[in-house]
Image: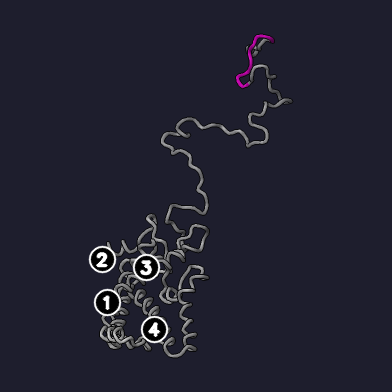
Amino acid sequence: MSEPPQDTPKPGSGWQPPDQLPGEAPASPERPPPYQGSYGGPPAQAVPAAGYGHPGAPPPQAPPVPGYGPPGHHHPGQHPGRHGPQDGIAGRGARLGAGILDSVLLGIAATPAVLFSIRWDRLEDMARSGEPMTDPMDLYNIPRLLTGYAIAFLLGFVYFTVLHARWGQTLGKKAFGIRLVRAADLSAVSWGQALGRQAFVYAISVTTGALNLLTPVAGILGLVGLLDNAWILWDERRQALHDKVAGTVVVKATPWTPNPYAREQTRS
């Protein structure tokens, strides 16, 4: 039994295959279909239908850019100040400004002790008689002066230690937007770290002052104490020597960075 005849389109009838454009010659094994993409560009891809392939599928997202993340995010093992332009370490200018402000505040607090040690009667006698002042220390009551310095010394020690251990910020650091944290994991410093850090600072100050009082030659040796703060000028993480001794680092306290002291106070 023979196969049924197939309808063959007649020439000039206007019929053309669905994939064939008007005026285009039909494809054949000798002539492949025309290229659908743009020359010099990527291959043409099918446009996905509405719904992104199947119902409930999420829309496609652009791949993440390497090296970036949300504000305040650090990759495991990454420390501020070591990678790229996003530097979380406190600037040298901010640390200098905070130190100056704290010194001014402590100086104001110590002023009454210094005024209390002045020999006002001696100063009045010199003003009446016109006697020249040969020794400035003759205007002070030395026991009172030493007591006043001891009170100022203790006040400064308590000021830095308590504020660093509780909030990581003195009034100067808070004004300049910086904070003291652990160098290892950027968490809140312990009381031992705060005590050791300030003890090292004051030990250098007392030693330098004592050397300056002995002799001018010994005063030159006292300049070694300047290395404590000057170390931040070339250190990679801008740590002073007392930071390295205590294992601390000063970072920027921006609104988008986590505050480790807030968590510690919530737990307590």
Report the Cα–Cα distance between label 1 and label 4.
Answer: 21 Å
Image quadrant for the C terminus?
bottom left
Q: How many residues crowd mark 4 within 10 Å: few (<14), some (14–19), many (20+)?
A: few
Three-letter amino acid code at disc 4? Val
Report the Cα–Cα distance between label 3 and label 1.
Answer: 19 Å
Of tags 3 and 1, which is closer to the observer? 1
Q: Which mark is residue 112?
A: 1
**Which residue corresponds to the image point at 49% horizontal and 53% vertical from the top-left?**
68
Whichever of callouts 4 and 2 sits on the residue coming sooner in the sequence is: 4
- The main secondary structure of the magenta stretch is loop
Q: Which mark is residue 101?
A: 3
Report the Cα–Cα distance between label 4 and label 2.
Answer: 36 Å
Above-or-below relation of 200 to 10: below
Of tags 3 and 4, which is closer to the observer? 3
**Which residue corresponds to the image point at 39% horizontal and 57% vertical from the top-left?**
254
Three-letter amino acid code at disc 3? Leu
**Residue picked out by circle 2:** 268
* Callout 1 secondary element: helix
